[in-house]
Image (cartoon, rainbow, N blue to C red):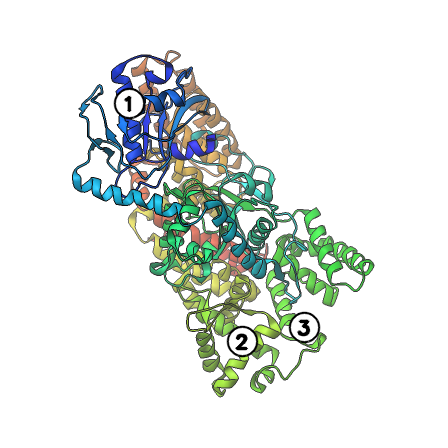
């Protein structure tokens, strides 16, 4: 047993097959009959197991306390020098029970600097009965007793006849299972079947221009960004002072980025991995690459790879992860699947957690979480992908990593692979690559260069450049030109047979084809399950849009869009052999949805129905970008709608305070930015006052507020909150530095604020040197929060008041205001026309 496996056991609750003891004199050679009887009793009860658990290996772990803490740890105690041996224990057991226990395994494993002693008791088909009286420190047990443990592991008791009968039947499963098939042979058989399927389905990827290549031919190593836990004060205090939260808003809550790590290496070392990334960042390609590498013996070659596309889930009540795995194994006996899973031999890839419908998502997430912590299955490897913006998916025992944008060398490698793969000669590909990179690096193409750092956008950019030798400046223009290529130019240049598809569709103009796809995308994106269509659903939308089209032609249109353009692709077939489709990339569906909204004047409906739904964030940004200089009314509607989230006295008081304490100040920051900083500080103090300072590190409200102002003061808000929560010399020193920095911004008009740094210096001098002077220290600890509150003219009552509505403030009001800022930048970049100045003036101001 290694330390990682031991840590997994430590995090489990005690049960019928798992017991913890902080110490045992027996293992150190102490001769004490009662201690020995206690020791034997624990092993025998684990060997018997409880009803329904008799096929699982049991463990007695010495050196770990029996109380499981909230953070999944236990008190640990070094067991010292272990003198006991397996044979000695087995001999003692032989005299204490019958039949004879055939084997146990003993290990000494180090964990967090402490040595623990682990006894592993393999499952057997026998029920063990005491053959002698066991006298333990707490209780005596008579001969002929069958000892079993309660399922929660808290009590050992004597089984009655009914329980013994049930347990004997359960234990027979071990004998019957052994006769089914050798586990090693079974694993090899199933691995071959699963690998055949994965190689067939996922070994090639289709480029946007519909060329198919091997999954690793265009694959550039994906680098992952490590997520730091933000659960402790230490990590809050260590935040980088000049972090640019504005640039990193779409990944806020994932922790500070700490260097690039090769994704392949991370996947090798972590058994539970959540891979986050922006739309089109290469999450699915990376997952497929790992699955194929497993089949080719390059990655976890001893495991069985199982690839499940979560977007295919239409009803969570019918989804069961075990059943999905069993289906992939293609075995008739579920016991075989259970045995493979118990061995920890399965590498499970779950693609697209964010693409599961909102209605089903929590149930699916709960199943994944329970499966990963199941006492029988926790040894298996799980790798999941999810969009970056979807930060609410927090799974225990998973490492969270983020797909990095391509750095310049990777952009060069990817584009060289693209052009040399598609060119007539290698030399021609090299020449086109050089021209492309030269064009991409020009100052006027800076915006598109900043966008072309993910596989999908870089693919589009390469393709468009290959066709036109030019680059569009904006993302929406990139999509537009790419889609034009898919719908028109691709057909023309490759002499696609025009007899494919209905005459009705062939006669549609390029604009009408885009409108049809926009109609389909918009109707589907408005549904809970927005990713997958049945073929009949697409046909219904086509019929509604084209109206005068026959049923035969409708079927042909679907096939035409799939075969000629690749914008809709068939993912699977249902039990009725009906095709199940989706857009080839969710990004395209979002673009078409935004296009429909703009062209059909659905702006008001978009704002009223989806303003705070984070799933629609990309649609809002694309809508604003498509509207450009005409986005004023759109942003005004968003700003007006946001006001309903603050229509309470509690939040109005907060906005009044932020407005009053920052008005008329000389700082070179826009008034809305000053108000945003004030609100961020108030929220940080609110977390401290509520004794939940650890939550502040991932407080989306603080992120939204700071993102509005574009001033990197995140470390300042945390320094204030930490000093408020935990006053001492170090936190006050940090606070003093912070106050001098904030004072330079000149955003607060309260006279007490200008004295704050001096007052803090005075308070620091009064900190008692002797921590035993508890009364004096308590007085000091009370004075610091009061000093901070006075400096910001922030009444405690107001803090308690707005903290009661923190959910609305964070996830609705501040989220929407940050979205307005982002939409403005998407529409008109840094320009500031009069209509924008009017909107900005109203932001974060009270309305009552």
Residue 820: x, y in percent?
A: 48, 56
Would you say 7 lies left or right of 212 here? left
Disc 1 or disc 2, which is closer to the eye? Answer: 1
Q: Can residue 751 be seen in this view?
A: no
Query: Which sits earlier in the primary sequence, circle 1 or circle 2?
Result: 1
Would you say 239 lies left or right of 204 here? left
Residue 814: x, y in percent?
A: 42, 50
Query: Which sits earlier in the primary sequence, circle 1 or circle 3?
Result: 1
- Label 2: few (<14), some or many (≥20) within 10 Å? some
Residue 645: x, y in percent?
A: 35, 54
- Distance CA(mark 1)–CA(mark 3): 82 Å
Q: Please tell me whether mark 2 sits on a helix, a strand or a loop.
A: helix
Q: In this figure, which residue is indicated by the disc labeled 2?
A: 515
Disc 1 or disc 3, which is closer to the eye? Answer: 1
Residue 490 is labelled as 3
Q: In this figure, which residue is indicated by the disc labeled 1?
A: 95
- Label 3: few (<14), some or many (≥20) within 10 Å? some
CB contact under 8 Å: marks 2 and 3: no
In the rendered image, which quarter is residue 122 located in?
Answer: top left
């Amino acid at each position: 047993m290694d330390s990682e496996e031991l840590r997994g056991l430590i995090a489990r609750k005690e049960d019928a097959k798992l017991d913890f003891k902080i110490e045992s004199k027996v293992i150190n050679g102490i001769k004490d009959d009662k201690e020995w009887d206690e020791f034997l009793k624990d092993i025998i009860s684990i060997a018997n197991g409880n009803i329904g658990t008799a096929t699982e290996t049991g463990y007695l772990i010495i050196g770990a306390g029996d109380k499981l803490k909230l953070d999944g740890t236990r008190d640990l105690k070094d067991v010292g020098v272990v003198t006991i041996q397996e044979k000695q224990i087995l001999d003692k057991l032989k005299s204490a029970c019958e039949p004879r226990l055939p084997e146990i395994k003993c290990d000494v494993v180090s964990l967090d600097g402490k040595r623990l002693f682990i006894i592993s008791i393999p499952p057997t088909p026998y029920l063990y009965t005491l053959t002698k009286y066991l006298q333990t420190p707490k209780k005596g047990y008579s001969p002929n007793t069958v000892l079993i443990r309660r399922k929660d592991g808290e009590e050992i008791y004597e089984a009655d006849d009914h329980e013994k009968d049930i347990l004997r039947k359960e234990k027979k499963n071990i004998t019957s299972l052994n006769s089914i098939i050798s586990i090693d042979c079974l694993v090899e058989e199933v691995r071959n079947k699963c690998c055949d399927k994965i190689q067939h389905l996922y070994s090639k990827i289709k480029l946007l221009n519909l060329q198919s290549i091997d999954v690793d031919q265009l694959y550039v190593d994906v680098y992952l960004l490590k997520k730091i836990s933000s659960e402790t004060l230490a990590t809050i205090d260590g935040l980088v002072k000049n972090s640019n939260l504005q640039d990193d808003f779409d990944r806020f809550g994932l922790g500070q980025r700490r260097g690039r790590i090769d994704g392949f290496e991370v996947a090798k070392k972590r058994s539970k991995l959540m891979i986050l990334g922006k739309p089109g960042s290469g999450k699915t390609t990376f997952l497929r690459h790992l699955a194929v590498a497993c089949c080719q013996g390059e990655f976890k070659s001893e495991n069985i790879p199982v690839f499940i596309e979560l977007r295919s889930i239409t009803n969570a009540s019918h989804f069961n992860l075990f059943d999905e795995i069993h289906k992939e194994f293609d075995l008739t006996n579920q016991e075989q699947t259970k045995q493979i899973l118990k061995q920890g031999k399965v590498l499970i890839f779950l693609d697209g957690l964010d693409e599961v419908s909102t209605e089903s998502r929590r149930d699916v997430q709960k199943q994944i979480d329970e499966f990963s912590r199941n006492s029988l299955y926790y040894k298996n490897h799980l790798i999941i992908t999810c969009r970056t913006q979807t930060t609410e998916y927090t799974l225990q025992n998973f490492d969270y990593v983020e797909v990095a944008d391509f750095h310049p060398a990777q952009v060069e490698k990817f584009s060289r692979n693209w052009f040399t793969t598609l060119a007539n000669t290698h030399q021609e590909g090299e020449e086109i690559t050089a021209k492309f990179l030269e064009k991409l690096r020009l100052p006027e193409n800076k915006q598109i260069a900043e966008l072309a750092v993910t596989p999908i956008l870089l693919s589009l950019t390469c393709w468009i450049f290959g066709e036109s030798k030019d680059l569009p400046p904006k993302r929406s223009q990139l999509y537009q030109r790419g889609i034009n290529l898919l719908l028109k130019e691709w057909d023309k240049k490759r002499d696609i047979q025009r007899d494919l598809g209905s005459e009705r569709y062939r006669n549609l103009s390029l604009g009408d084809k885009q409108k049809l796809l926009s109609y389909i995308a918009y109707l589907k994106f408005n549904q809970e399950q927005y990713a997958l269509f049945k073929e009949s659903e697409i046909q219904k939308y086509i019929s509604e849009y084209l109206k005068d089209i026959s049923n035969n032609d409708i079927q042909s249109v679907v096939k035409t869009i799939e075969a000629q353009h690749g914008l809709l692709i068939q993912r699977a077939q249902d039990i009725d052999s009906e095709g199940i489709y989706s857009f080839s990339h969710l990004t395209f569906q979002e673009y078409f949805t935004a296009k429909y909204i703009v062209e059909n004047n659905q702006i008001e409906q978009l704002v009223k129905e989806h303003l705070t739904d984070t799933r629609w964030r990309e649609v809002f940004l694309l809508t604003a970008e498509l509207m450009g200089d005409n986005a004023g009314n759109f942003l005004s509607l968003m700003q007006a709608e946001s006001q309903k989230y603050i229509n309470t006295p509690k939040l109005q008081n907060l906005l009044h305070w932020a407005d009053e304490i920052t008005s008329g100040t000389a700082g070179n920051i826009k008034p809305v930015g000053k108000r945003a900083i004030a609100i961020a500080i108030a929220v940080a103090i609110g977390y401290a006052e509520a004794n939940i300072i650890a939550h502040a590190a991932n407080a989306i409200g603080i992120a939204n507020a700071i993102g509005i102002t574009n001033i990197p003061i995140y470390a300042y808000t945390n320094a204030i909150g930490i000093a408020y929560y935990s006053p001492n010399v170090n936190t006050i020193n940090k606070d003093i530095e912070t106050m001098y920095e904030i004072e330079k911004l000149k955003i607060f008009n309260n006279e007490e604020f200008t004295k704050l740094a001096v007052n803090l210096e005075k308070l620091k001098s009064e900190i008692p040197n002797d921590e035993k002077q508890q009364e004096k220290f308590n007085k000091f600890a009370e004075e610091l929060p009061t000093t901070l509150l006075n400096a910001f003219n922030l009444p405690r009552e107001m803090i308690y008041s707005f903290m009661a509505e923190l959910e609305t403030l964070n996830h609705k009001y501040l989220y929407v205001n940050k979205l307005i800022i982002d939409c403005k930048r998407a529409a008109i970049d840094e320009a500031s026309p009069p209509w924008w100045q009017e909107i900005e003036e109203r932001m974060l101001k009270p309305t009552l």
